Amino acid sequence: MSFLERWWSEANTTYRKYFKSLAEEGRLEISGGNWVMNDEATPYFWEAVENIIVGHQYVKETLNVIPTTSWSVDPFGHGLMMPYLMMLAGVDQMVIGRINTDIKNVLKQHHHLHFRWAQTWDSVKIIICFLVILEEAKECRNVRHYFSEQSGQTSDCANDQVRINIFDLLLVFRELFMLAVLQQLRWAPFVNVLPNLYYTVSSACGTDESICCQFDISKTSRSYCSERARVDNGQQIALYGERMAHQYRTLQTFYNSDTVLVAAGDDFLYSHSDDLEIVHRTYSALFKYINRNYARFNMKVQFGTVANYFNALKRSTKRGASVLDGDFFPYMDNAFSSAPFWTGFYNHRAYFKRFERIIQRELRLADLLSVTTREYPNNDLETARRNLALSIHHDAITGTSKRHVMDDYLLRLRSALYTILREQERLLNISDNTFTTMLVNVSVKTKGMYLPRRTLLFTDDIESYKIQIVNQKAFSTMELIKLNISSSFVTVTHDGELLTTQIVPLLNQVDLFEFLYNDGSMETNFDFYFNQVADSGGAYTMVAELPFQNIRNGNQLPAVVVQGPIYSSIWQQLSPQLAYRITVINSTDDSARSFQIDVFTNVSLMPGHTFFMNLNTSIRSGASFYTDVNGLHLIERKHDKRMKFEANIYPMITETMIEDDKLRCTILGAQSTGVTSKQGVLTLMIDREMHNDDGKGLGYYEASESHPSHLKYRIIFEAKVSQRKNFNRGEKMVYEKKESENDSLPINTSTLYHSQLVQQNLEELLYPAALFSSSNTNSTDIMSLLAGLPCLPDNIQLITARYIARKTVLISMRQLPYDCSVMAYCKGNDDLVQLDLKI
């Protein structure tokens, strides 16, 4: 909707009226309706929710329509988040495009490019698995034949005769079981997968691109073809009508239906004013010829919208209803290309991925302040919100746009940041000295993503500051609070009591000091190291040239160890490209149960390399590991030793985890990246610098320019419940599941959820305490503005609370189904509360 908004803002009244009437009549469809077609492998789900809300609200207010279908054909792989969120938004019919080519070929062979896409935690999982087994049995020999040809591996259907006998016995019940499944699948949209590699005219119309390119006839055509379709006389119409009908017929074999969707455009096709007229005139003549000869072609062809297509499917007598779950990562387009696996973008331009998460947390804080102070936000905040939504476009957050486009995205984010900060200050009605922790100041250059905190300068005129802390999470928390100060001779008090603090000199800034407050201790053992690999991929793909290389630097600085009453840490500069810090808080609180990792990268002088962080544990995890579904829950992955290293990398939006019967290890990230694992070792992409053209869209050197980044992680070890008798920390543990927590949630699913400890650490990482300061110690007390806000129950996550109209507040929350297989440590908000909302 971002481009529609630009066009609408410049269109005259006549064009607006005509456009709106077409939309209301259904002749022009708004499919999807999101602000942008977002990437699915990198955004946190909060950002995707905002993207949907911003887009759908604009469409409703501008055109008075509500989208019911989705067209998302360009993201580099598809995940489980979007079908779930789109169903919540009322969109239950989807078209997707880019899925692993080998998987697509299997689906095509078995006529399953139509399917219901189920969530792994859906309550009918057992029935779904049963039906999948029946489908496998039905096509067992064909499946075995395919895999034996493609990979040389034996089929899982080794005992064909037994399975076929079972299938024969139960075949009569299949339709009845399928009907029961479809009635219970609440979160499973109907999906149409485009059959070919691309959705351009030359690729989409059938199986022969040398024929399909003939129908790419617009002035902005980008295909190379020896001839183009013409309709100047009856002979030409008959010739090209025959070819079109034949190509359309080849597509029908891939679907279990008698209705086929064919795309008639691409990203840039209708950019010339004559394109639409040329396409419509030529295609209309060919359609008329095909339809007039129905007895010969046995098909009816017409223009239509995505909604028209799905409505036709509903009337179809052959509409199939296979059920699939899982996701489509990683994306592989062509197994025979030099760079087939699209896993490089998971971590490409890491600075951008980190920066947009910072904007997200500040926007969320501004929204909460707006609601709690009952102040309607300025219009500029909506512009900032739209710019943030723009940043999760599938060529933005992925880092796969040209350099000048990435610079524009970055400038928009920076502008959004300043707007949000000004709005926070306005809402709190405090002085211009107000600042928020970790935010860039006005002197920071446009390029360069280190985000230093403002420094509290003590002078003869300013001898004290008032620091106020805002917690935007829905639970009480104890966090490490850091301030930059210009003098080490300071004391800190709260309500007249002197607080324990720790003052640490900032490395490379000997005239500044870092100040911290907390208490406690923690200990554990693991191997933690960094390495790098030569990478001949590009912005989209990774092509690892193994083996890994140690990060060598003859001038490597010795480690700096800091110990104090608040925390202990190790800091080391490994090379000019990489430094890290490991911090452990000295506390008995939940905050001490994680290792805080800060990684500082500046890889611009190391083109053609990807850097990795490795955690080596004693966990016997085998080939299994888990990554998160955009922060919602976890999904199991398998390391396939037959595949290349880059083919085993999966998106890590916020979390990855390995476990065995005794121990679980989780790594949380404040920014998205890629991860893989085998037998107790987690390997995370940290940063990369690419100059190569991998043939996916960016030319040589367009993929480069990785700015310095400050990346944040947390490492958490948790004992499994089965080991509780052997686990002794001299403190009370909680093992029993509370009756009120998860009783309504499905059990026996393949989905894993966060533990309460991990969930709270994740929210602390994404939404750290915001700090506001003033040299006027008599300034407004923020707490008086936020007084009376209750903590939510410990299994309820506050997603957002914000105005969507002057007298309308949107509050979205999520029930958290905590994993009970690990020991629970967290102190919860046990009492349920009633929210009294007034405007």
Image (spheres, rainbow, N blue to C red):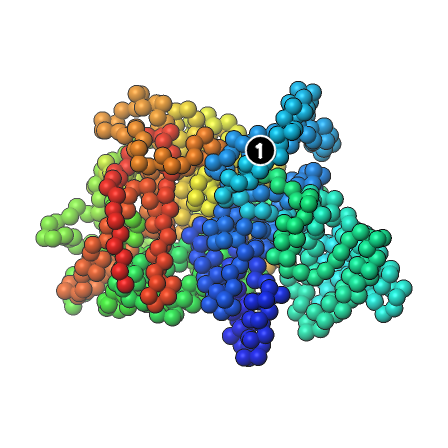
The location of residue 386, given as percent across then percent down, is 45, 64
Q: Amino acid at mark 1?
A: Phe
Tell me if I can see residue 168 in this picture. Answer: yes
Q: Residue furthest right?
A: 235
Q: How many marks?
A: 1
Q: Which quarter of the figure has residue 23?
A: bottom right
Q: Measuring from the top left, give residue 705's x and y in whole percent.
A: 53, 58
State the image quarter where residue 275 is shown: bottom right
- Give the answer, above or below, for where 47 lies relative to 556: below
Q: Nearer the viewer, residue 134 or 9?
A: 134
655 with respect to 266 (left or right): left
Q: Residue at x 58, y 47 (%)?
A: 190
Q: Position of residue 166 (x, y in %)?
A: 64, 23
- Identified at 75% across, 62% down, the residue is 216
Q: Residue furthest left?
A: 496
Please indicate whether residue 5 sits to the left or right of residue 256 in the image: left
Q: Quadrant of residue 147?
A: top right
Q: Nearer the viewer, residue 32 or 756?
A: 32
User: Between 826 and 617, which is closer to the camera in this rendering?
Assistant: 826
Dot 1 surroundings within 10 Å: few (below 14), some, or many (20 or more)? some
Could you tell me which residue is drawn at 49 percent across and 43 percent down?
186
Q: Residue at x 57, y 79 (%)?
A: 14
Residue 762 x %, y %: 36, 44
Badge 1 marks a residue whose secondary structure is helix
Looking at the picture, tell me which residue is in the foreground, 183 or 193. 183
Residue 568 can be seen, yes or no: no
**Residue at numbered disc 1:** 177
